Amino acid sequence: MNLPSSLLRRATFRLRISRSVTSTQAATHFPTTRKYSQEHSSDGYRLQLYNNPLHDLVGEITIPNGSYTLEFARFPVFPSPKEPSTSCLLWGETKAALLAEKFQPSPPSVPSRPGMYFLGPSSVAGTGVFAQEDIECGEAIMVERPFLMAFSHTPDNFGVDPTPLIPMVPEALGLVVAERLSKSEQTDFYRLFSSDNSVWPIMSQNSIPVSEPLPGPYSGPHNVVCRDVSRINHSCTPNVELTWDPTSFTVLIHSNTRISKGEELFRPYRNILEPRSERMELLYQIYDFKCACPSCSLPDDESAKSDTFRRFLLEPRYTL
Ligand SMILES: [Zn+2]
C-alpha cells in the first residue's frame, strides 16, 4: 500500500500537536539495559518490542489482518577496518531480502578534495556546515555513510489504516537508538538540532529521505541520519544538492553553484518549486522553523515573481 504521505511525516504532525499533553510519549529515552521489553496496544493494533542481543528481532506489529516483524540490521555486515556502518530499523522482509542478496555496500567514494568543509555555529539554527575553501560548481564536497536508517512507510501490503500505529513506531526507533547505536553514535544523534531533544523529533527534523528502494516487498522510502550531512541547514535557494548512492550506502553532497570559503552550505529539505506560502507552512509543520532564507525574505512583490518562476519550472513544457 502506497500511502499518500509518509508515516514519518504524519507522526511528526501528531507529535507536534500532542507534545504538550503526551510528553512522556514524545520523550522516548530508554534505559541502557539488555532486558528491555514493552508492549502497546490500541484499537486492535499492537506493538511488542524486544531487545535480545542474541538475535535481531526488535519488534512485532500486529494489525487486524496480520502481523509484521521489525528487525535490526547493520550494513556492511563485515565492514573493513575503520569503515563506518549503518544501523537499520527495517521491516523483517526487507532484511531477509538484503541478506538473501548477500548485500555488501561498496567502500565509500572520496570527495573531490579532502577537508572541504567544517562545522560551526550556523547563521540559521544550531550547528551548520561551511566551506573550508572556495568550491567550484559541481564538486563533490561530502561523502558520508549514515549511522542510522529507518523505514518511513508501512509495508506495501499493509492493507489497513496505519494511524493507530503512529504513536507506537517511535518506540521501536528509540529502542534501536538506545540499544544498538554505539556510544559515540548516540552522542552524534543527540547533538543534532531539534525543538524537542528526544528520539522522534530528532529523527524527523534531521533525517534525509532515501527514495531508492531496498530489495524486498517493501518499496517505500527509508530515512537516514548522518553525523555531518544532517547538520546542513535548509534554504529555498540552496547551494548544494544531495544524492543517495545505493551501492555504497552513502549520501553525497555536490555544489550546484560556486561557493566561497567560509560560506554556509544549504540544501533543500523539501520541494522548493512550491510557492513561498506552501513551503513555509510545510517547513514549519514538519521541521518546526519559519524559513527566513533569501527567497522567503523577499518583499511580497518580489516573492510573487519568484513563485511565478518556480511555477514555470514545475509546468511540463514539452511533449515527446
Ligand atoms: Zn525559504
Image (cartoon, rainbow, N blue to C red):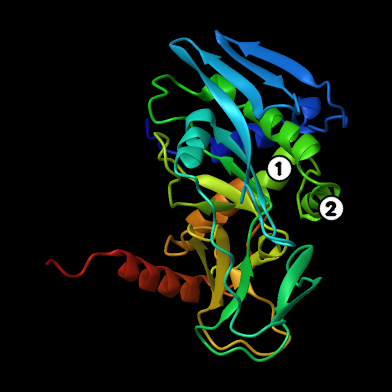
Q: Nearer the viewer, mark 1 or mark 2?
A: 2
Whole-number angstrom distance, CA of label 1 to CA of label 2: 20 Å
Q: Which residue is mark 1?
A: 201
Report x, y in % for residue 271.
46, 59
Q: Is residue 171 above or below residue 4?
A: above
Q: Secondary structure at mark 2?
A: helix
Locate residue 27: give its quadrant. Answer: top right
Locate residue 265: give its quadrant. Answer: bottom right
The residue that appears at 70% across and 28% down in the rendered structure is 171
Q: Which residue is mark 2?
A: 184
Q: Is residue 95 above or below residue 195?
A: above
Q: Within 8 Å of ligand 1, the CB of disc 1?
A: no
Q: Is residue 269 visible?
A: no
Report x, y in % for residue 155.
45, 30
Locate residue 141: give its quadrant. Answer: bottom right
Residue 162 - label: none
Q: Is residue 226 above or below residue 91?
A: below
Q: Secondary structure at mark 1?
A: helix
